[in-house]
Image: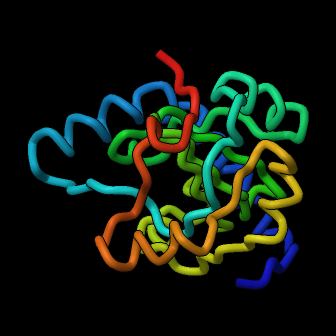
């Protein structure tokens, strides 16, 4: 989606930002209630596996590292199965890098439209991209990438993750 900076578009963005300031505090409660009532459905983990937290590193340390790179909490997002933290880095009002870390140390991320600017397109995952190279730059040595034998194991077992204990990954909590 191209960003046309006309007066009308800027006005609409200001209106959306104002609405989200009002909606945001209640949004997670409404989202979670709709999921519990079965009106909305969400389970599993997002696409675009990046790897795992490097051995000897912690989720808390990774959060601090990513905060220095401009990432912050993204509490409006879906909560994935086994998710420990959801962080995002805005590029502007319309686009964001969204990264999730799971309790087993797995890290997944994608680039997407923001829910504030494009709620329906965001919900339908329109425009979502892996942007792996950018995430590798953000994560640096905090990420342990997939090894060939892990990829083979995942394909054979249809598994989307390796147990944290088998990887020696410290987890929080």
Quarter of the N terminus within the rendering: bottom right
The reply to whether residue 66 is in sight is: yes
Total marks shown come to: 0
- Name the residue rendered at 46%, 77% in the picture: 152
The reply to whether residue 113 is in sight is: no
Pinpoint residue 29: horizontal percent, then vertical percent: 32, 29
Question: Could you say which is closer to the camera, residue 82 or residue 117?
Answer: 82
Tell me if residue 12 comes above or below residue 61 in the rendering: below
Tell me if residue 17 comes above or below residue 153 in the rendering: above
Pinpoint residue 104: horizontal percent, then vertical percent: 46, 39
Query: Please, which residue is most extreme toward the bottom here?
Result: 2
Res. 148 image quadrant: bottom right
Tell me if residue 107 comes above or below residue 9 in the rendering: above
Q: Is residue 53 left or right of residue 71?
A: left
Query: Please, which residue is most extreme toward the top here?
Result: 173
Question: Could you say which is closer to the camera, residue 151 or residue 129?
Answer: 151
Res. 101 image quadrant: top right
- Name the residue rendered at 49%, 25% in the picture: 25
- Name the residue rendered at 72%, 34% in the picture: 72
- Name the residue rendered at 21%, 55% in the picture: 40
Tell me if residue 22 comes above or below residue 173 in the rendering: below
């Amino acid at each position: 989606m191209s960003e046309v900076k006309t007066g009308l578009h800027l006005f609409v963005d200001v209106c959306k930002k104002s609405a989200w300031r009002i909606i945001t505090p209640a949004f997670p409660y409404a989202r979670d209630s709709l999921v519990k009532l079965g009106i909305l459905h969400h389970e599993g983990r997002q696409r675009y596996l990046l790897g795992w937290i490097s051995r000897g590193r912690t989720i808390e340390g990774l959060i601090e590292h990513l905060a220095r790179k401009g990432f912050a909490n993204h509490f409006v997002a879906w909560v994935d199965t086994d998710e420990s933290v959801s962080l995002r880095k805005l590029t502007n009002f319309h686009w964001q890098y969204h990264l999730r870390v799971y309790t087993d140390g797995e890290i997944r991320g994608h680039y997407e439209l923001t829910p504030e600017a494009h709620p329906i397109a965001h919900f339908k995952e329109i425009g979502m991209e892996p942007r792996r190279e950018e995430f590798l730059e953000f994560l640096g040595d905090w990420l342990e990438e997939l090894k060939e034998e892990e990829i083979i194991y995942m394909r054979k077992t249809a598994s989307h993750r390796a147990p944290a204990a088998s990887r020696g990954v410290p987890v929080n909590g």
